[in-house]
Image: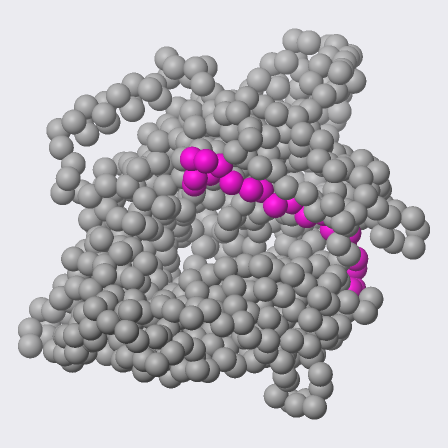
């Protein structure tokens, strides 16, 4: 394969030299297109004309996809409510052969639904002349309805010859070298380019305060508005405020800033409609390059294509210490740096810079026995590391089932209750990366400095997949800062796929809810049995306890009783009498879930039965989510007292001790008075404060039963370990 590549390249060189010498004698039109190894196609997507209407209002929200050889290489922006959209978007594509046509597909964006197919067209690249721009207008067709007129798409194209010996960062993405181990040095160069591009240079803190005088989209003269934010690939979605034109959100989001010169934050406002597509209210933008750093800016942004305006607080700050390095490159200076980090997060500095909570250092050493994802029986694995919204990745090790990465990642910790996720993928040129395995590790469960082999799990984290990954993790944090951060809202994740109806998930949540209700019913039966004197000794003891508690009851006894419950469970655990087990019902339901198949672009061309009955689906999804929330709340309460997360249970004990002392020594009227004064004056003292419930924020850090199963570390089967297999199969 390498010899063929050299022959093609050497055959192309004389032509390139001749082309440079004879440029004044021969025009491009007279020259045949040479059989070069690489071309660059510059495409300008200009506009669409008379496109098909796919929405009930007689309009569409079109966007365009380009494909070459079955792979998506470009997706345009969405133009809302426009049948004659103007894009003027440019893209440069690298292609290694001209026989594959450029496939153009147009879709109508439907929020929450599968996008409607609006037509497609093919462009034969062999009809293009080198270095001569060409404007084309392509009629759109639907293969199922060839007689329908779906409008046209206007493009401007220029084909350029690409030097096959050029080795820039973009060219290194091609498959010509990817499948050969002899080009690993080049892949490392690509890694350096990618590594630099993925390290963020700052944090953009956005606080969505309110909206004013928004456009009414519903028949009652009101709207149910929510807001979407986008900065590059990062997206957030606010909560929905029902029946108002002047919503008060008070939500805060953090985005990563990758470019020193800033960037553009795209903001769109939508009206939530149950049972149909959400209505577009308006849009605005924030140009970060115009804002000074380390300063909070109050912005009032009028909405384009709509009415009213949004009020935002925007702050640009320097990035936290996020680094990537090689294990082999680490020196004695790193030990000194480690000591400095330990001092920085000591208890003596508990009230210095409360946001600087801790530091995570992750060493990704190697993996063994990975799944073969390619037809050659090998894989091209790389790792993606995620800590909340912080996301970094390793380089790719080609044609290897036992890769060694030897990379060190350093993150700043924003929430000690966060989850460290390490996912292994197989790099694939022709489609999205193939999933090979994943581990999810709660930070509080990590043993510092211990190199461990983690069994890789499936996408749902419910069972093992093939292979193990060797990690060494250090978590250094300040316990006081971490405890205070437990009482504030969790960091929201970037926008994820809209929830879809799942029979297995609905059944699982129903069973979880049923179990919680049965606990209450059984408790009621138990109390009632005391009244019925089914067991005289038990009823007599309950009667004496009732008289004692009622006669001597004080308000401080409520947190005291919860404190005693925590202490009793702790005693059971320490004495070895605790019979806690993983909830078999939840485990069975998790194991019964089917993995969701990856959706490709063909799904966008036709709608399934569930999407046509979207209103019914949305109701079912809402029921599914409500069941999950209620069951999770009850399970989090139980797991707090069951010491599932000792850090949180100790924190609850300290809080209950404080509450008991306060209620014992301070009259209740004074406590209520202080609480009421604080509530009434909070908006006056700090008008842009984001209100929160400390108890709910605390419980949000406690894992539910489902999460307990997902975060449970699987034990490696010694008989299935790669080293054991090598001994058994020396050949």
Q: Is residue 150 above or below residue 361?
A: below
User: Residue 472: x percent and y percent?
Assistant: 25, 44
Depth check, front residue: 605 or 249: 605
Q: Quadrant of the image for the C terminus?
A: bottom left
| Picture residue at 69% right of the left edge, 79% below the top | 150
Tell which residue pokes out farthest to the front in this image: 25
The answer to whether one can see residue 447 in this image is no
Magenta stretch in the rendered image: 257-276
Tell which residue pokes out farthest to the right in this image: 220
User: Residue 284: x percent and y percent?
Assistant: 68, 43
The answer to whether one can see residue 547 in this image is yes
Asked if residue 544 lies left or right of residue 185, the reply is right
Depth check, front residue: 586 or 551: 586
Res. 231 image quadrant: top right
Q: Is residue 118 above or below residue 362?
A: below
| Picture residue at 63% right of the left edge, 32% below the top | 207
User: Residue 312: x percent and y percent?
Assistant: 67, 32
| Picture residue at 54% right of the left edge, 72% below the top | 135
Q: Quadrant of the image for the N terminus?
A: bottom left
Q: Is residue 259 magenta?
A: yes
Depth check, front residue: 691 or 321: 321
Colouring convention used in this rendered image of the protein: one colour
User: Residue 89: x percent and y percent?
Assistant: 54, 59
Q: Is residue 122 magenta?
A: no
Tell which residue pokes out farthest to the left in this image: 730
| Picture residue at 55% right of the left edge, 75% below the top | 136
């Amino acid at each position: 394969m390498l010899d063929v590549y050299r022959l093609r390249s050497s055959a192309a060189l004389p032509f390139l030299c001749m082309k440079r010498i004879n440029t004044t004698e021969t025009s491009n039109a007279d020259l045949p297109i040479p059989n070069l190894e690489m071309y660059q196609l510059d495409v300008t997507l200009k506009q669409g004309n008379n496109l098909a209407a796919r929405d009930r209002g007689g309009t569409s929200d079109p966007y365009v996809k380009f494909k070459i050889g079955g792979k998506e290489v470009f997706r345009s922006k969405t133009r809302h409510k426009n049948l004659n959209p103007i894009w003027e978007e440019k893209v440069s594509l690298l292609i290694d052969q001209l026989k594959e046509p450029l496939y153009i597909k147009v879709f109508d964006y439907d929020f929450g639904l599968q996008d409607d197919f609006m037509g497609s067209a093919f462009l034969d690249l062999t009809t293009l002349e080198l270095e001569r721009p060409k404007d084309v207008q392509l009629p759109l067709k639907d293969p199922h309805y060839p007689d329908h007129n779906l409008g046209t798409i206007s493009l401007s194209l220029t084909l350029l010859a690409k030097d096959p010996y050029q080795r820039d960062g973009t060219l290194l993405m091609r498959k010509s070298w990817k499948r050969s181990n002899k080009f690993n040095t080049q892949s490392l160069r690509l890694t350096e380019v990618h590594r630099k591009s993925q390290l963020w240079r700052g944090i953009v803190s956005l606080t969505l305060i309110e909206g004013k005088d928004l456009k009414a989209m519903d028949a009652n003269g009101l709207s149910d508005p929510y807001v979407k934010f986008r900065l590059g690939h990062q997206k957030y979605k606010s909560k929905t405020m029902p029946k108002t034109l002047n919503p008060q959100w008070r939500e805060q989001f953090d985005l990563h800033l990758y470019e020193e010169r800033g960037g553009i934050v795209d903001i769109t406002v939508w009206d939530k409609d149950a049972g149909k597509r959400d209505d577009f209210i308006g849009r605005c933008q924030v140009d970060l390059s115009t804002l000074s750093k380390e300063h909070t800016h109050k912005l009032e942004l009028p909405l384009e294509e709509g009415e009213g305006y949004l009020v935002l607080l925007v702050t640009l700050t320097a990035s936290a210490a996020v680094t990537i390095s090689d294990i082999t490159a680490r020196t004695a200076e790193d030990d000194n740096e480690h000591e400095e980090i330990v001092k920085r997060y000591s208890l003596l500095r508990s009230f210095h810079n409360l946001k600087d909570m801790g530091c995570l250092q992750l060493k990704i050493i190697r993996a063994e026995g990975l799944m073969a994802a390619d037809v050659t029986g090998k894989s091209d694995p790389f790792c993606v590391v995620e800590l909340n919204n912080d996301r970094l990745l390793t380089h790719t090790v080609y044609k290897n089932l036992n890769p060694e990465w030897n990379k060190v990642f350093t993150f700043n910790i924003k929430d000690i209750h966060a989850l460290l996720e390490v996912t292994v993928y197989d790099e694939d040129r022709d489609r999205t990366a193939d999933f090979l395995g994943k581990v999810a590790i709660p930070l509080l469960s990590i043993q510092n400095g211990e190199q461990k082999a983690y069994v890789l799990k499936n996408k749902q984290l419910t069972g093992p997949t093939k292979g193990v990954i060797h990690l060494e993790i250090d978590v250094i944090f300040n316990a006081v800062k971490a405890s205070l951060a437990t009482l504030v809202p969790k960091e929201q994740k970037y926008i994820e796929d809209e929830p879809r109806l799942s029979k297995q998930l609905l059944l699982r949540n129903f069973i979880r809810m049923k179990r919680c209700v049965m606990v209450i019913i059984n408790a009621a039966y138990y109390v009632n049995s005391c009244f019925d004197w089914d067991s005289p000794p038990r009823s007599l003891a309950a009667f004496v306890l009732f008289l004692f508690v009622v006669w001597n009851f004080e308000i401080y006894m409520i947190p005291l009783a919860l404190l005693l419950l925590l202490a009793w469970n702790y005693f059971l655990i320490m004495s070895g009498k605790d019979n806690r087990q993983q909830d078999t019902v939840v485990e069975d339901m998790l194991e019964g879930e089917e993995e969701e198949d990856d959706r490709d672009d063909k799904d966008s061309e036709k709608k399934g039965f569930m999407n046509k009955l979207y209103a019914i689906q949305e109701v079912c999804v809402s029921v599914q989510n409500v069941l999950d929330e209620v069951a999770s709340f009850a399970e989090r309460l139980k797991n707090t007292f069951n010491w599932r997360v000792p850090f949180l249970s100790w924190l609850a004990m300290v809080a209950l001790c404080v509450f008991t002392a306060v209620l014992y020594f301070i009259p209740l009227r004074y406590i209520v008075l202080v609480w009421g004064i604080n509530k009434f004056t909070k908006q006056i003292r700090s008008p842009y404060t984001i209100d929160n419930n400390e108890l709910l924020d605390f419980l949000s850090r406690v894992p539910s039963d489902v999460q307990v199963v997902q975060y449970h570390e699987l034990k490696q089967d010694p008989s299935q370990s790669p080293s054991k297999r090598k001994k058994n199969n020396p050949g």
